C-alpha cells in the first residue's frame, strides 16, 4: 500500500507530457457522411436532423455533415443541430465543403479564402473540429506546379484563420491538383501548419490505390471510406481491413466515416455497410 501511494505521489510530480508518453494504441470510430444521403437531402425527403438521428439509431459515434444542402447558416439552425447531436450522443466532428484553391493571387483567391473563413465560423459554432476541403482543378493555362503553389498560399492563409477558431482543414485527395498522393503530401508539408492535414478518401485514387493511401496515411486526420473502388478501370469492393491496417500502422486515431456512393438504394444498403463498419472499427481498436 505504501509503495503504491509513493508511486502515485511521484507521478503527480511529473510534467503532463511524461504521463502521456506511452502510445495509447489504435482507435477507429464509426461515423457517417451526410453525403451518403445526398439524394434524400436534396429532395428534402431527409433533413440534417434526420441524419443525426439515423447515426444515433445505428450506434455511430459521429457525423460528417456535407453542407451542400444546409437550409441556413443562421445560429438558430446550427445550434439546433448541435443541441440535438449532444442529446443523442453523436458528435458533429466535421463538415465538408466545396472549395477550389487553384486560384491566382488576387480577387478570385481572396473570394475563395472568404468562403473558407465563412465555413470555419460555421464549424466552430457546431463544435466541429475539422473541415474537409478540396484543392480544385488545375487551369488549362497553368502547370501542376504553379497551381499547387496557389493552393499552398490560399490554404496557408485559411489555416491562420482556422487555427484561431480551433478548426483543422483536411485537404482531400479529390482529383484535380490532389490526384496524386505525392502532390497532396507536398502541399500539406509546404503549408506547414498544425491546422492543415489530409482528409483521406479511400475511393478517390484510380491507380495504385493502396500504396497511395499508405503514402498519405501519416498525414490523415479524417478518413472517409467508400464501399467500392475503381483501379485502372476495374471495379472492386473496397478493402476496409487493408485500409484499417494501414491506418493503425501509422498510428491513426479517429473516425472512419462511411461515404456511400454505390448504385443500390441508400436507405436499403447503408444499414448493412454500417454494421460492417462498426465491426471493422472494433476489430482494429485497442
Image (cartoon, helix red, strand yellow):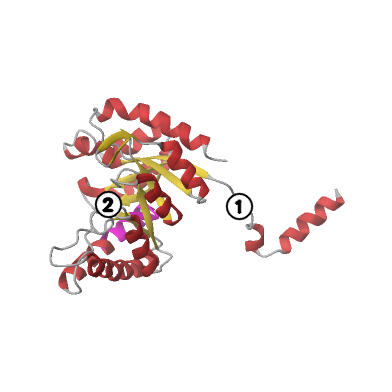
Q: Residue at x 81, y 51 (%)?
A: 4
Indicate which disc, 2 or 1, sits on the residue closer to the N terminus.
1
Q: Residue furthest bottom?
A: 106
Secondary structure mostly seen in the magenta stretch: helix
The image position of residue 166, as x and y in percent, is 41, 62
Q: Which residue is mark 2?
A: 174
Q: Residue furthest left?
A: 141
How crowded pointer 1 is (Cα within 10 Å; few <14, some 14-19, many 20+) is rated as few
Relative side of 254 to 130, left or right: right
Do the residues under discs 2 and 1 have CB atoms within 8 angstroms?
A: no
The image position of residue 30, as x and y in percent, is 43, 39
Q: Quick check: 286 above or below 3?
A: above
Q: Which residue is mark 1?
A: 23
Relative side of 43 to 286, left or right: left
- Read off the magenta span: 118-131
Q: Nearer the viewer, mark 2 or mark 1?
A: 2
The image position of residue 147, as x and y in percent, is 23, 67
User: Is residue 58 among the parts visible in the rendering?
Assistant: no
Determine the secondary structure under disc 2: loop
Q: Residue furthest right?
A: 2
Relative side of 11 to 25, left or right: right
Residue 41 position by quadrant? top left
**Of the pair 253 and 216, the residue shown nearer to us:** 216
**Of the pair 258 and 215, the residue shown nearer to us:** 215
The image position of residue 197, as x and y in percent, is 39, 59
User: Is residue 214 among the parts visible in the rendering?
Assistant: yes
Q: Residue at x 27, y 70 (%)?
A: 149
How crowded pointer 2 is (Cα within 10 Å; few <14, some 14-19, many 20+) is rated as many
Which mark is on residue 223? none
- Picture quarter with the C terminus: top right
**Of the pair 218 and 164, the residue shown nearer to us:** 218
Amino acid at each position: 500500500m505504501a509503495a503504491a501511494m509513493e508511486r502515485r505521489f511521484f507521478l503527480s510530480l511529473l510534467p503532463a507530457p511524461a504521463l502521456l508518453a506511452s502510445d495509447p494504441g489504435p482507435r477507429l470510430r464509426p461515423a457517417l457522411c451526410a453525403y451518403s444521403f445526398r439524394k434524400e437531402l436534396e429532395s428534402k425527403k431527409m433533413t440534417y436532423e434526420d441524419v443525426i438521428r439515423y447515426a444515433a439509431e445505428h450506434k455511430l459515434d459521429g457525423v460528417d455533415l456535407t453542407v451542400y444542402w444546409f437550409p441556413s447558416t443562421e445560429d438558430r439552425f446550427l445550434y439546433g443541430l448541435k443541441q440535438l447531436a449532444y442529446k443523442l450522443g453523436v458528435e458533429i466532428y466535421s463538415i465538408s465543403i466545396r472549395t477550389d484553391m487553384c486560384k491566382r493571387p488576387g480577387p478570385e483567391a481572396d473570394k475563395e479564402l472568404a468562403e473558407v473563413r465563412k465555413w470555419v465560423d460555421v464549424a466552430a459554432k457546431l463544435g466541429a473540429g475539422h473541415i474537409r476541403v478540396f484543392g480544385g482543378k488545375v487551369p488549362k493555362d497553368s502547370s501542376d506546379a504553379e497551381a499547387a503553389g496557389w493552393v499552398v498560399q490560399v490554404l496557408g492563409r485559411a489555416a491562420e484563420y482556422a487555427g484561431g477558431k480551433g478548426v483543422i482543414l483536411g485537404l482531400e485527395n479529390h482529383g484535380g491538383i490532389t490526384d496524386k498522393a505525392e502532390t497532396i503530401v507536398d502541399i500539406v508539408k509546404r503549408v506547414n501548419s498544425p491546422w492543415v492535414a489530409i482528409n483521406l478518401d479511400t475511393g478517390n485514387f484510380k491507380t495504385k490505390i493502396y500504396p497511395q493511401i499508405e503514402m498519405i496515411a501519416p498525414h490523415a486526420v479524417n478518413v472517409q471510406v467508400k464501399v467500392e473502388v475503381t483501379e485502372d478501370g476495374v471495379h472492386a469492393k473496397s478493402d476496409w481491413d487493408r485500409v484499417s491496417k494501414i491506418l493503425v500502422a501509422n498510428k491513426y486515431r479517429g473516425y472512419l466515416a462511411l461515404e456511400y456512393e454505390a448504385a443500390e438504394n441508400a436507405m436499403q444498403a447503408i444499414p448493412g455497410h454500417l454494421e460492417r463498419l462498426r465491426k471493422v472499427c472494433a476489430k482494429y481498436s485497442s
